[in-house]
Amino acid sequence: MLNQIAKALAESAGAIREAGILEPTQTSAARDAIITDTTITKRRKQVLLDIYSSLRQQNETAREKPATA
């Protein structure tokens, strides 16, 4: 599967692993859609993945904060 993604991104599987594009703990339908979309450039995919990751992290942080009274 990684080789197919690498081919779609015109990258090697090793380069994808090193770039941190595929992290097993952060799989989701949205990430999969971004990674496999052949109409988006590699740079734009990385930007979208960074934004998506940031938004998920913000949501987790918001859930961890205790509600103020």
Image (tube, rainbow, N blue to C red):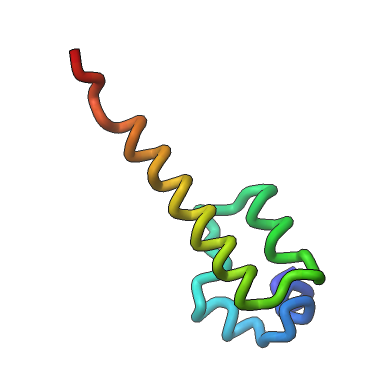
Q: Position of residue 47 (x, y in %)?
A: 55, 67
Left or right of 20? Residue 8 is right
Image quarter in which the N terminus is found: bottom right
Q: Position of residue 17 (x, y in %)?
A: 55, 77
Residue 49, by quadrant, is: bottom right
User: Does 65 sit above or below residue 50?
Assistant: above
Q: Position of residue 62 (x, y in %)?
A: 34, 34
Residue closest to the eye, 66 or 7 = 66
Q: How many circles with numbers are drawn on the protein? A: 0
Residue closest to the eye, 5 or 49 = 49
Left or right of 21? Residue 64 is left
Image quarter in which the C terminus is found: top left
User: Does 61 sit above or below residue 1?
Assistant: above
Image point 68% across, 85% down: which residue?
11
User: Does 17 sit above or below residue 66?
Assistant: below
Residue 7, by quadrant, is: bottom right
Image point 59% across, 53% down: which residue?
27
Image point 50% across, 80% down: which residue?
18
Image point 47% across, 45% down: which residue?
56
